Image (cartoon, helix red, strand yellow):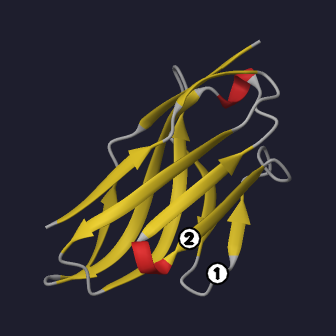
Amino acid sequence: QVQLVESGGGLVQAGGSLRLSCGASGSIFRLDRMAWYRQGPGKQREFVAHISSGGSTNYADSVKGRFTISREHAKNTVYLQMNSLQPEDTAVYYCNMYVRGVAGWSEFWGQGTQVTVSS
C-alpha cells in the first residue's frame, strides 16, 4: 500500500508565496512521474505542473514563471513552490505520482490541500 501525504496549504494574500510538499510512503520500489493538479471552486481538476524521474518539467501556461516543481528522490517527495499567488490560484491542490510497488506500476493521488489567495 502506498500513501501520499500533502502539506503546506493555507491562506495567503495576493502576491504572496506558499510551498506545497507531498511525500510518498509504503511499499515503493520506484517513483516515476510526479505532478500537481488543482481544482478550483466549481471547476474541473486541471493540470498544474509535472516533473519526470530525470528532472524534466512542464507547466500549465497559467502558472509558468510563478510556480516551480521539484523533487527529492531520497525522501520520495515532490514540492511546488508557488510565488506571486493570485486569487485565481485558489483551489484544492492534489499531488499525483506513478509508483512501482509490489503490484507493479500504479497511479496514486494525495488527499488534497487547500490554497486560498485573498485579494
Q: Relative to 47, is 31 on the left or the right?
A: left
Q: Relative to 75, is 102 on the left or the right?
A: left
Q: Where, quadrant-wise, is the C terminus in this rendering?
A: top right
Q: Residue at x 69, y 72 (%)?
A: 57
Picture coordinates of residue 111, whole percent (x, y): 32, 43
Picture coordinates of residue 81, whole percent (x, y): 67, 50
Quadrant in which residue 55 is drawn: bottom right
**Amino acid type indicated by mark 2:** Arg
Q: Relative to 114, is 4 on the left or the right?
A: left
Q: Relative to 42, is 117 on the left or the right?
A: right
Q: Residue at x 26, y 66 (%)?
A: 25
> Which label sits in the foreground, 2 or 1?
2
Q: Is residue 11 above or below residue 101?
A: above
Where does label 2 land, which residue?
71
Q: Residue at x 81, y 53 (%)?
A: 64
Q: Secondary structure at mark 2?
A: strand
Q: What distance separates the C-alpha of mark 2 from that of mark 1?
A: 8 Å
Outermost residue on the right side: it is 65
Q: Is residue 91 above or below residue 87?
A: below
Instruction: Give the label on residue 2, or none.
Output: none
Where does label 1 land, which residue?
55
Quadrant in which residue 90 is drawn: top right
